Image (cartoon, rainbow, N blue to C red):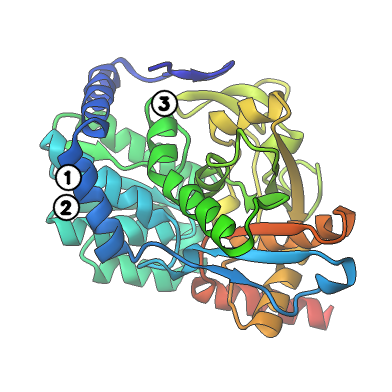
Amino acid sequence: MTTRFGDYGGQFVAETLVAPLEELCETYDQALQDPIFRAELDHLLTTFVGRPTPLTRLQHLGIEPHGVTMWLKREDLTHTGAHKINNAIGQALLARRLGKRRIVAETGAGQHGVAVAAACAYLGLDATIYMGSVDAARQRPNLQRIELLGATVQLVDQGTATLKDAVSEAIRDWIGNPDTTHYLLGSALGPHPFPRMVREFQSVIGQEAKQQFLDATGRLPDAVVACVGGGSNAIGIFSAFLDDRVRLVGIQAAGDGRGARGKHAAPLVYGTPGVLQGMRTYLLQDDNGQVELTHSIAPGLDYPGAGPEHSHLKDIGRVEYLTADDNEALNAFVALSRNEGILPALESSHAVAGALRIAPSLPRGSQLLVNLSGRGDKDLTTAMDALDTRKDA
């Protein structure tokens, strides 16, 4: 199994982690070939996660004037409310196979933390979740859910106290306890084999969506849109369409200003290749290679890098990466809620905003598929405060 996607990926790690990563690679390869492992994973995806998730055809949301129909892949309807549970249950099974009963994980928006806590509770594993204190304050409902599910939460105050810093602390924990602990990384990033492994566990999204779309329409969508932070929900749905004549569009966070340093989180649009947290990928860095600050109203997108497969897909031109800013995401958050009765996560709202932007450029009669990666209950306080601020401005 190659460790890279073109020029990206690899294993830029401390020597302490070389042996655990080799063990993980070997166990993961064996698990994929084991029908018992696959059967248990499929069973849990059905009976615990709630798969398959449906496709929903939108009825009102600003599409008809352009003759374009929009569909949503409803990952918001999974147990715990986002796509993160697909990977969490897969890696938790893998950890049990490794004989490691302690799990560490990072979380930004909190959905990965909730998913890991739920999976560990169900499978009888101990979980410690690292979360930036800034994210914990703006995602308090998810913090409470994580604790209620029995996981230990370690708040991170270093750096920007957001997702990047939570990842760093989880890695430090893993480095210190490699024999007893599995790092259940939540996105398609980090050192090999995590990007491939997370893509595999999230590929169920694309496999389902492709067949469901064919069943509903008799054809493939003209375009598939997903938000991209680390990039797991996006690579999960894109993976099924990479060999098809389907336009693939990833939407990153433009935050408060497109291209302005410290004001956005769009490395695939404004970044350059470098090394971050065990991988070579596009990242936001200054001329000296120091990682820059980021901002997004969506904590799950507030990250200075992206998964290495996304970097490769950008370079070869297979996926188009665009941005949506905070205001556009808020507009999409409100529009989907009021016009369709579906409350999206702020991360997913970026994908909806991107889809609404490209819809007018598509030929009449086009079909547009959006991965709605999570639900927005966790974001109500943040979104309503931002909307009130905007109204008062």
User: On residue 234, which mark appears?
Assistant: none
> Of the residues shown, which amino acid type is indicated by label 3?
Pro
Residue ID for mark 1:
102
Q: Earlier in the sequence, mark 2 or mark 1?
A: 1
Residue ID for mark 3:
191
Residue toward you, 11 or 169: 11
Which x, y percent locates residue 307?
54, 34
Query: Which residue is depicted at the point 76% across and 45% down?
Result: 322
Q: CA distance from mark 3 to mark 2?
A: 23 Å
Q: Secondary structure at mark 3?
A: loop
Q: CA distance from mark 3 to mark 1?
A: 20 Å
User: On residue 126, which mark appears?
Assistant: 2
Q: Which part of the image, by quadrant, shows the C terminus?
A: bottom right
Q: Is residue 167 left or right of residue 209?
A: left
Say if residue 214 shows up in the picture. yes
Which x, y percent locates residue 6?
58, 17
Q: Is residue 359 left or right of residue 375?
A: right
> Of the residues shown, which amino acid type is indicated by label 1?
Arg
Query: Which residue is depicted at the point 81% across and 47% down?
Result: 258
Which x, y percent locates residue 182?
23, 38
